[in-house]
């Protein structure tokens, strides 16, 4: 796919996150999807700020998913994968312990 598609996806998800009131149904999913899209853009462009932002959004999504929440395992998995990606792709990263 085109990087333009990823950029548009990120912008649309930013709009959704901004419009959805915190605590509404789906807010955790919107944050997780935004983080995953930023991770995808990193895969195409290699800009470290995308991974940093993705980790922040995954962490915020995780705060909305207490133990027993239906997507907690998905958010935890995606956060761990993003930490691992940052560790593998960027020098001097200490993220493997976080993952």
Image (tube, rainbow, N blue to C red):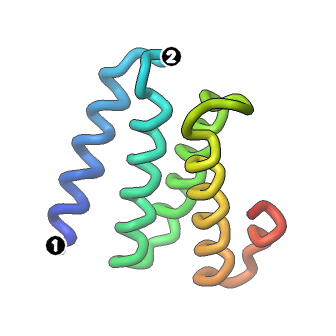
Q: Quadrant of residue 17?
A: top left
- Which residue is pictured at 60% across the width and 66% down the height? 81
The picture places residue 85, in percent across and down from the top left corner, at: 59, 74
Disc number for residue 2: 1
- Count every numbered label the image shows and give the total: 2
Which residue, as the protein is rendered here, is positioned at the far right?
97
Q: Which of pointers 2 and 1 lies earlier in the amino acid sequence?
A: 1
Q: Residue 67: x percent and y percent?
A: 73, 32
Query: Which image quarter is the N terminus in?
Result: bottom left
Q: Nearer the viewer, residue 28 or 41?
A: 28
Can you say whether 18 is above or below 79 in the image?
Answer: above
User: Under tag 1, what secondary structure?
Assistant: loop
Where is residue 21? Give x, y as percent. 41, 15
- Kindly report which numbered mark, 2 or 1, lies closer to the viewer in this rendering: 2
Instruction: Indicate which disc residue 16 carries.
Output: none
Q: Secondary structure at mark 2?
A: loop
Q: CA distance from mark 2 to mark 1?
A: 33 Å
The residue under the point 30% across, 22% down is: 19
Report the residue marked by disc 2: 23
Left or right, 30 with reference to 4? right
Residue 63 lies, with reference to residue 83, above or below; the image says: above
- Position of 81 relative to 26 (above/below): below
What residue sits 47% from the left and 45% below the top?
32
How many other residues sit within 10 Å of disc 1, few (<14), some (14-19) or many (≥20)?
A: few
Quadrant for the C terminus, please.
bottom right
The crowd level at tag 2 (other Cα within 10 Å; few <14, some 14-19, many 20+) is few
| Residue 15 x %, y % | 27, 33
Q: Residue at x 59, y 53 (%)?
A: 55
Q: Are marks 2 and 1 in contact (CB under 8 Å)?
A: no
């Amino acid at each position: 796919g085109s990087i333009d598609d990823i950029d548009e996806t990120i912008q649309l998800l930013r709009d959704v996150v901004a419009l959805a009131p915190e605590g509404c149904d789906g807010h955790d999913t919107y944050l997780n999807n935004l983080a995953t899209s930023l991770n995808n853009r990193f895969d195409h462009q290699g800009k470290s700020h995308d991974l940093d932002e993705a980790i922040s959004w995954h962490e915020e999504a995780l705060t909305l998913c207490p133990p027993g929440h239906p997507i907690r395992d998905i958010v935890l998995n995606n956060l761990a994968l993003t930490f691992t990606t940052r560790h593998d792709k960027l020098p001097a990263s200490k993220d493997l312990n976080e993952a």
